[in-house]
Image: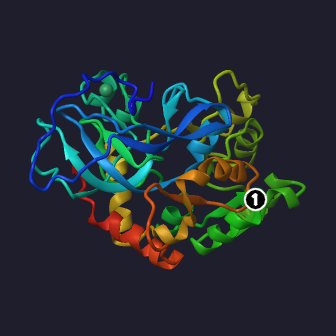
Amino acid sequence: MRTTTTKKTEAGEALKVAATQVTVPSKMTAAVLYGSEDLRIEMIDVPAVTADEVLVRVRLALTDGTDLKVWKRGYHAKMIQPPAVFGHELVGEIVAVGKRVDSKWRIGARVIAANSAPCLRCYHCRRGQENLCDDLLFNNGAYAEYMRIPGRVIGCGPIGLNYVRMLSRRGVRVIALARRSAPLDVARRLGAVATINVTETADVVSAVKALTEDQLGPDSVVEAAGNPATWQQALAMVRRGGVVNFFSGLPSGTRVEIEPAAIHYSEIKLISPFHHTPRFFREALEAIRRGDISARDFVTEEIRLADLPQAFARMKARSGEIKLAVRPHAVARHPSLREFQRRILVASQSAAPAFL
Ligand SMILES: [Zn+2]
């Protein structure tokens, strides 16, 4: 079972054959997730694409926090069930186009694909909450030489906006908290006015409040660390009348002890956004185009696909990585990191934001 989507598709429909079509091999190297901390590099079939799908030759794939979480856990209830091809952030070019795909998607076009696509028909989709779609289609398989992109998935933008960067640019004074110094260095570079290393701070809540007006606490707290203790800290540090954004997802069955009275009588608003909508994805790509977000700030290293399993083990030990760029195709000459980062940016800017 090595499909790139969670949906069944009729396999083997003929592709558009054009003189310009590139030759695609029948086998490819890919990272296949088998379970908890069990990621294997294997030779598997290049995905066959149906009439409404395209095949992308992956130029670069990026690691992210969700992949690290899934690698540790071995699955994600919504996004991926092993064994399955893995990875979901990529840039590449189209090498095969299904018969019914819109003609604007041509062979050779540089594209970025979202990792999910809503149905646009259900109750939630019709109310602009596509991230809660009853039939959200997820797509994995970016850590591979080729990846199938289903017709429903949108072709634009990177996955995550960096809160520090985006909020700072909008004039928000951001205090960043982390366990390690490396991400805090980046946070300062991206505009945080203060950083707190929580492992070196006895009372994190007081330390944060001390940095705010009249020591009341922040107007809003974004919890993106992903553990019950930080959920509690977020509630403890927000000011009265403030907002707590529980951005991280905790595993099913997790319980967090909270004091309802503190929430009610302090009128604290709780929000917990999940995933992304197509609009969010386009805005993210626009942010890159405008220069609000730079790939340089996030990619710390380039690795080969064969080194990916070890890379996840390193990320688990938190050796300072932010995002690793995985290059699935061998290149004759390894470019310098600066050159490689420039290429990511160029690739991001040349991708067309539109429906696939
Ligand atoms: Zn829907």
Q: Is residue 183 left or right of residue 120?
A: right
Quarter in which the C terminus is drawn: top left
The image quadrant in which ligand 1 is located: top left
| Relative depth, front residue between 242 and 280 | 280
The residue that mark 1 highlights is 208
The quarter of the picture where residue 101 lies is top left
Q: Which residue is located at x 31 percent, y 67 percent? A: 349
| Relative depth, front residue between 241 and 144 | 144
| Relative depth, front residue between 77 and 190 | 77
Where is residue 316 drawn, in percent x and y?
72, 48
Bin the neighbour count of mark 1 within 10 Å (Cα to Cα): few under 14, some 14-19, many 20 and up: many
Where is residue 24 drawn, in percent x and y?
28, 47
One can see residue 43 in this view: yes
Q: Amino acid at mark 1?
A: Val
Q: Is residue 325 above or below residue 224?
A: below
Q: Is residue 130 above or below residue 146?
A: above
